[in-house]
Amino acid sequence: IINIDFNAKNIYETIGDCYIQIGSSRFDINEETLENYGGGLSITESGTYYIQVFTQSGVLLYSYKVIKTTPLNAWAIIAIVIAVVAAVAITIITIKLRKKPKVK
């Protein structure tokens, strides 16, 4: 889970009337709505999200890109470890077999 929190009062004092677009959610920030936004938004699904701050007239001021990926599960990690161990073993065996025996 990615939690996106913002302080609407600080944004309003810095920019004035504006809105924040997070994915498909829109948060209008003006004098009447300052008290409504105490928290933010939680991203639970994998994907690419853009957090954008616009003026009330639609001019983009700030843009942030957030990428949420799913972590590897236990089976994927075990498969990767087994593949690496097998590759190292094959490399060592190949090197050992390629050495020429000494003939006297």
Image (cartoon, grey):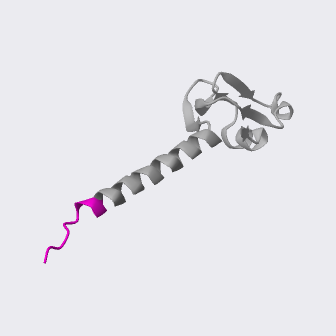
Between 77 and 52, which is closer to the camera in this rendering? 77
Q: Quick one: which residue is furthest to the top in this view?
A: 24
Main SS, magenta region, reads loop
Residue 97 shown in magenta: yes
Residue 68: in magenta span = no
- Residue at (59, 36) in percent of width and height: 69
Residue 39 percent coordinates (x, y)? 81, 37
Q: Quadrant of residue 13?
A: top right
Q: Is residue 10 left or right of residue 103?
A: right
Give the residue at x 41% y 56%: 89
Decide which of 17, 96 is in the foreground and name it: 96
Q: Is 86 placed left or right of 43 in the picture?
A: left
In percent of width and height, residue 9 lies at: 78, 41
Tell which of 96 and 39 is nearer to you. 96
Horizontally, residue 78 falls left or right of residue 91, namely: right
Q: Residue at x 30, y 63 (%)?
A: 96
* Residue located at (82% from left, 28% from top): 33
Residue 90 seen by the camera = yes
| Residue 97 left/right relative to 41 | left
- Where the C terminus falls, by quadrant? bottom left
Magenta highlight range: 95-104
Visible in this render: residue 71? no
> Where on the picture, by quarter, is residue 45?
top right
* Quarter containing the N terminus: top right
Position in image of residue 93 (x %, y %): 34, 58
Residue at the right extreme? 35
Estimate the x, y position of residue 4 in percent, counting from the top left: 71, 39
